Amino acid sequence: MNEVAIRVRNLVKEFDLIHSGYSSLKGMLLWWKHRRRETVRALKGVSLEVRKGECVGVIGKNGAGKSTLLGVLARVYKPNSGEVELNGRVAPLLELGAGFHPDLTGYENVFFNGVILGLTRKQVDERMDQIVAFSEIGDYMDAPVRTYSSGMVLRLGFSVAIHVDASILLVDEALAVGDIEFQRNCLQRISEFQRAGGAILFVSHDMRAVRQAASRVIWMREGEVEMDGPTEEVVSAYERSSEHQGPAGTPEERGLPIDERR
């Protein structure tokens, strides 16, 4: 039996929201309403396992807690309670352009991110040609990242993530922005990563990509695991429901102010 790469037990994550009732200094002085605090539970006792060599998709409507789950696994958020076990180096690709400095060039950002993810400068330098080739950025590597299109930023971020000797890859909607050719390259690389024993947990609203890449799917609903099983079985159940048509959103996904991340 394959060794467990990710183990989550009874994971709970809450966010504190502040509803002020005003949006300006004048409003703060004159508005009769008092500040109101609301605690929103984004993850409600989530438990799951991902084994080495397994690619698991996470689906569900906006607000289901998918991105929060990946954020906790990537140590962006600290859980309120529960256990998280990660057996291996983690390479997160959680948000378009996350970790990239807009005023640094592509080359400079590759060095910066590679070191953050555990490589030495020498190792980054040795892999630079491979990273650039996969990203297909070409001459733009000398330009500031703020001049890149969203697709270029995505390609560069994904290329760095898969060249850092990680054994666990966390991906949030990375395939949604790329073109068809890039998506094909990503799926091929994900397959190679799996065969080498890597574990992948990826969030996507693209059911076609989920069907192609994942051998197993976790459907999340309102911060809980609704269903966990074979890809076609879970995706079909999700599509039969009204879940995939809802426009909801978690507090952090809707852009509401977060007073405290615990």
Image (tube, helix red, strand yellow):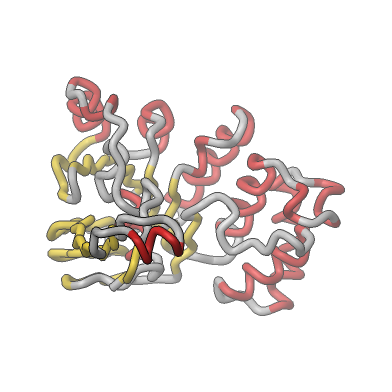
Q: Position of residue 138 (x, y in %)?
A: 82, 46
Report the side of 219 relative to 199 (left or right).
left
Residue 143 shows in this picture? yes
Q: Quadrant of the C terminus?
A: bottom left
Q: Position of residue 67 (x, y in %)?
A: 35, 52
- The picture quadrant where one finds residue 186 is top right
Looking at the picture, tell me which residue is in the foreground, 96 or 84.
Answer: 96
Q: Is residue 113 above or below residue 191?
A: below
Q: Residue at x 26, y 40 (%)?
A: 217
Q: Residue at x 28, y 37 (%)?
A: 248
Q: Quadrant of the N terminus?
A: bottom left
Residue 195 shows in this picture? no
Looking at the picture, tell me which residue is in the foreground, 149 or 140.
Answer: 149
Report the side of 111 relative to 95 (left or right).
right
Looking at the picture, tell me which residue is in the foreground, 124 or 258.
Answer: 258
Seen as rendered, the residue at the extreme top is 240
Q: Residue at x 37, y 66 (%)?
A: 29
Q: Position of residue 108 (x, y in %)?
A: 76, 67
Q: Is residue 85 above or below residue 54?
A: below
Report the side of 144 relative to 61 (left or right).
right
- The picture quadrant where one finds residue 221 is top left
Q: Position of residue 105 (x, y in %)?
A: 79, 60
Q: Residue at x 36, y 28 (%)?
A: 207
